[in-house]
Image: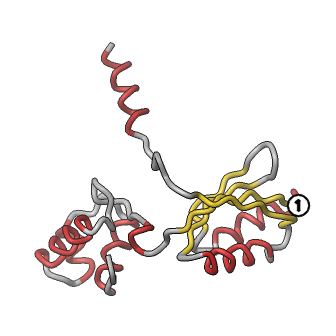
């Protein structure tokens, strides 16, 4: 999708913040007509900005097409502060404390490599970060999913 206007962005934010929001509630909360909200949501779905099911934003469709996985080595006394600082970087989508090489693993998105470099510099400036290792995702073959797990549970419960 070429351009998201302020109303599109407000719709996306409302849907992210409350995935169960109904079209009527969405329209009322944004001060727009119900038909306008419905039309906009349909357009966002057709454009691929909203994934099938309509509640998850495809970040690539809104310009964040660089995905990186960053392993961070942290001074253990500073772990809580590092996690708190990572929470403030909008491009950091998720943070996990890990075993093995490194202490923290992050998924980071960016609009291009310059934007990624800027985000990585922010990470490196965090007190307690010793070093990072970054791996770029070239292609997503299987996006995050839960359906196969729940299907397996459903089959097992019917047996």
**Which quadrant of the rendered structure holds the C terminus?**
top left
Q: Quadrant of residue 50?
A: bottom left
Q: How many marks?
A: 1
Residue 95 relative to residue 145: left or right: right
Residue at 22% across, 63% down = 22
The quadrant where residue 40 appears = bottom left
Residues 94 and 77: in front is 94
Return the x and y of residue 154 as percentages of the image width and height: 34, 26
Locate residue 96, reporting x and y percent.
67, 52
Residue under the point 49% across and 72% down: 64
Q: Residue at x 19, y 67 (%)?
A: 42
Which residue is situated farthest in the left direction here? 35
What residue is shown with label 1?
75
What is the secondary structure assignment of the residue under circle 1? loop
Asked whether, in this view, residue 10 is left or right of residue 64, the answer is left
Residue most extreme to the top = 159
Residue 73 or 36: which is nearer the viewer?
73
**Which image quadrant is residue 76 in?**
bottom right
Q: Residue 92 in the image: x percent, y percent?
A: 61, 67
Quarter occupied by the N terminus = bottom left
Q: Residues within 10 Å of mark 1 (few under 14, many from 20)?
A: some
Between residue 25 and residue 76, name the one nearer to us.
76
């Amino acid at each position: 999708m070429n351009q998201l206007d302020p109303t599109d962005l407000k719709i996306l934010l409302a849907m992210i913040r409350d995935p169960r929001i109904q079209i009527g509630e969405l329209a009322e909360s944004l001060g727009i007509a119900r038909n306008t909200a419905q039309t906009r949501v349909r357009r966002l779905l057709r454009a691929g900005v909203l994934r099938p099911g309509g509640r998850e934003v495809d970040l690539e469709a809104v310009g964040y097409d660089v995905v990186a996985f960053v392993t961070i080595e942290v001074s253990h006394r500073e772990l809580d502060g590092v996690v708190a600082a990572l929470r403030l970087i909008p491009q950091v989508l998720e943070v996990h404390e890990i075993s093995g090489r490194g202490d923290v693993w992050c998924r980071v998105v960016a609009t291009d490599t310059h934007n990624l470099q800027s985000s990585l510099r922010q990470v490196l400036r965090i007190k307690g970060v010793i070093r990072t290792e970054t791996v770029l995702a070239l292609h997503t073959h299987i996006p995050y999913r839960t359906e196969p797990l729940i299907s397996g549970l459903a089959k097992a419960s019917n047996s």
